Image: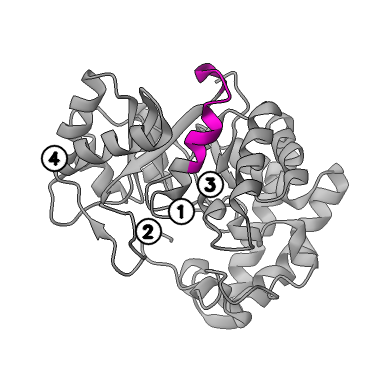
Amino acid sequence: MKNNRVGLGTFPLADVFSHVSKDDAKNLVRQFIKSGGYYIDTAPMYGFGEVEVLLGEVFKEFQRDQYYVVTKCGYIDVEGKTFQTIQKSGKYDDVIRECNISLKRMGLDYIDLYFMHSPDPNTSAEETIKAMVELKKQGKIKEIGVSNVNLAELKEYNKNGDVKFIQNRFSLINQSIDNEFQDYLNEHGIKLVPYQVIDRGQLSDRVFNKIGDMRKEDLRIGRSDWLPDKLNVITDWVKEELSPIAKKLNISLEQLSIAWALHQKYLGFVIVGMTKPEIINVDLQSNDIKLDNDVLDEIDITYKNLIEKVKKVSGQTIREFRGLNEKHY
C-alpha cells in the first residue's frame, strides 16, 4: 500500500465523545484529505446516517481517487434510531438495500471496502457473504470485509475466500489477535484494519491531563475499561513505562502506539479517531516512523510487565480486568 496507512475514524464526528460541530467535522475531513490522508472509515450507525451524509458533502469537493471509503452493513433503517433501538440484520436483501442507501448518502458510485459490522446471530454467514459478493459483481463495492469477529466466525465468512480484510478492536494494550488468528490471516492473505489503536485516548499524551474530565454525554463514561480503578492502573503504566520509550524516540505516545500497530505483519491500515485539526499531521506522520527490533522488544517487555501488574492487583488477564468480552471489545 503506497498511501499513508493512518486512516480517519469518523465515529467521534458523531459528537459521541468531545463535542464536534458538523462544520468542524466537515473541516476536519477536508483537512485530512488535503494533508495526504487517504483511508476514511465510517458506518451507517455513526450518527445514525448523519456522518455518511456529512462525508458525502465533503467528498463532492475532491476527486474520487483522493480518498478510500470504508463503510459497513449489518444494521438497518438507522435514521432516527438510538443505540438501544437499532436493529441488526445480515440478511441478503437488507445488505443489498443498506449498501444502496449508503451510496446515496455519500453520493458515491462505489465503496472501496464494505464490512459486515458484526455477525448477525440470526443470519448465516453464507447468506451475508452472498449479498456482498453480488454487490462486488455489480461494482458497488471493491473489497469485502467482516468486523468484530472471532476466528471461528471469520472462517465461516471466508469459506470461499471472499474476505480480504477484518476490522477488530486492537491496540498495544488490547492485543486481541493471538498466534492462531495471526497465522490464519497470513495464510489467507487477509489484513487487519484495527480500530481503537490508541484506546480512545488511553494510549496518547492525553493521559498526562485529566483524562477522566469528560462531558456527561461522553460515551466512554461508565464503560468497563474506563472505570477509575481500571483506568488508573493503565495510565500509571503508560506514564511510567511506555512514555519513556516515546520520549527517547522523540515522538508522541500516540505516534508510538500507531506506529507499533503498523509494524504488525498482518496489518492493512489503521483507523484513528481524530477530532482536533492539529492532531491530523501528527498522526499521519506515524506512517513513516520506523521502530527497530530493539524498540519493538522493549515495548513487548513493558507489555509483559503490564500483564504481571494487572495479574498482581486483580488476579485477572488484562482483557478480564478491563471488562472486555471474549472478542476483546
Which residue is label 2 attached to?
Answer: 327
- In three-dimensional space, the C-alpha distance between marks 2 and 1, rounded to whole angstroms, equals 7 Å
Q: Amino acid at mark 4?
A: Asp
**Quadrant location of residue 66?**
top right
Q: Which residue is mark 3?
A: 10
Nearer to me, 273 or 33: 33
Whether pointer 2 and pointer 1 mark residues with C-beta atoms closer than 8 Å, the reply is: yes
Residue 268 horizontal/vertical position (percent): 50, 31
- Dot 3 falls on a residue whose secondary structure is loop
Crowding at dot 4, Cα within 10 Å, few <14 / some 14-19 / many 20+, comes out as few
**Residue at (66, 40) in percent of width and height:** 27
* Image quarter (top left, top right, bottom left or bottom right) of the N terminus: top right
**Residue annotated with mark 1:** 176
Residue 266 versus residue 62: which sits nearer the camera?
A: 62
Q: Is residue 281 magenta?
A: no
At label 2, the amino acid type is Lys
Q: Which residue is mark 4?
A: 93
Q: Secondary structure at mark 4?
A: helix
Question: Tag count in the figure?
Answer: 4
Image coordinates of residue 265 in percent, x first then y, are 53, 33
> Residue 253: horizontal and vertical position, in percent?
75, 52
Of labels 4 and 3, earlier in sequence is 3
Q: Which residues are magenta?
A: 54-66
For the point 31% across and 54% down, the residue is 78
User: What residue is rendered at 49% in x and 75% in y?
Assistant: 224
Residue type beneath disc 1: Ser
